[in-house]
Amino acid sequence: MQFLFFIMLLIAGRIWADSLPAAASGPQRVLRLEPSSGNPRNSEGAFIRLADGRILFIYTRFTGGSGDHAAADLAGRFSSDDGKTWTTNDVVIVRNEGGLNVMSVSLLRLRDGRIALFYLCKHSLTDCRPLMRVSTDEAKTWSAATTCIDDVVGYYVLNNDRAVQLKSGRLVLPVALHQTSTQEKFDPRALIMCYFSDDNGKSWCRSTTAQKAKSSEGKEVTLQEPGVVELKDGRLMMFCRTDAGMQFISFSADGGDTWSGFKASNIVSPLSPASIKRIPKTGDLLLVWNNSYDSKSKTGGNRTPFNVAISQDEGETWRNVRTIEADADGWYCYTAIEFVGDFVLLGHCAGNRKDGDGLGVTQITRFPVEWLYSK
């Protein structure tokens, strides 16, 4: 009887151990989408959890070249095991409908249960604007596209995985305007603003505040590729990549309509986008970025290493800096973040500057939330 009881304890212990979260073993590369013949670049994606439990990752699949203006479609891959493995064949979600291309995907689950798909439709250097489609059948089919910005036609940048839905239900698109039809040339120092909707995307309003920035010394700062995260006190924090050696931040207390002036943050960074989202399991903020800066470089250095950190005080400070990738020739940027139970999925560019411009490869990296807190 004692032997039998011992065996039962071992079996029970094994079942209990198997039910524990995975050990904080660190990041794993679970998918790499390499360039191929007729597909010279893969980049900029976003995730959505479907009703049947699968995860859909939609990314930009270039077909006409590797440049930002080359022809491209939006393609999808699926995972049925929380991001551990992925399907091997692309499913075309949106074929190229722009004069140049379509790219930079965001995905949201709307409050009414529909899935919203946002992406840039790039017709020219004076007409690049976000479009929106919705799906009522879990991404099997999509509605006709509607234009989110129709008041001022121009070249707007809405990065991938940047559309947010606030607790109030408001949709917010942080955008950077670089050129309009009345401007003679493209301005790298973008005008930063938001467009927001309180009716699930039927209509959009431009924020009252549209601004540029200067450093504390009065020098003009290049602002680009804004992102937004909602804080616990209801304010929004906007963050932008800059040429000043760090991300700049601004705050809104009215849902994205008016904003404080930009100021330097404590997030050291080259001219490369950061991503910030809240970790559902802990309530802390997760930052993904390149934790480096080279003052001798015009762009602040290369987009490497690839780092994560957490904030337990709503972005005031960042701790537990971890390195995901550290190849000196690597190019890690344009990150989508998805939380899947006890794990984090990052969809990001992970090319190598020795082999090309660095933006040709898209990678999905997976790691336990616990790893962010391990000592």
Image: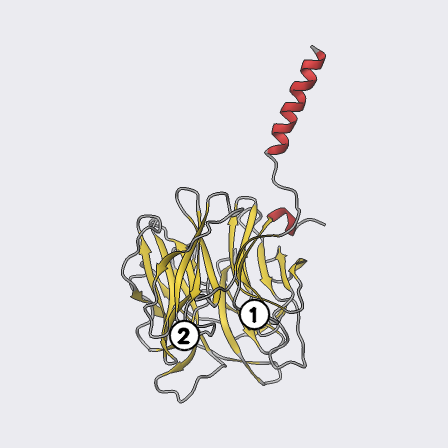
Identify the residue shown where x is 66% and y is 65%. 327
What's the amino acid at mark 1? Gly
Image height of 25 relative to 263, above or below: above
Question: Where on the picture, by quarter, is residue 14?
Answer: top right
Please give the residue where the numbered disc 1 appears in the rendered image: 358
Looking at the picture, how far across and down is residue 116, in whole percent? 36, 56
What's the amino acid at mark 2? Tyr
Q: Decide which of 327, 218 is in the foreground and name it.
A: 327
Q: Decide which of 278, 136 is in the foreground and name it.
A: 136
Q: Is residue 166 left or right of residue 153?
A: right
Question: Where on the picture, by quarter, is residue 121?
Answer: bottom left
Looking at the picture, how far across and down is residue 252, in whole percent? 47, 67
Report, in whole angstroms, how far the alpha carbon at label 1 lies from the one at label 2.
Answer: 23 Å
Looking at the picture, how far across and down is residue 192, in whole percent? 46, 75
Res. 252 visible in picture: no
Image height of 110 relative to 37, above or below: above
Of the numbered discs 1 and 2, the one sitting upstream in the chain is 2
Query: Label for residue 309?
Result: none
- What's the colour scheme? secondary structure
Return the residue found at the far front.
37
Res. 154 visible in picture: yes
Please give the residue where the numbered disc 2 appears in the rendered image: 156
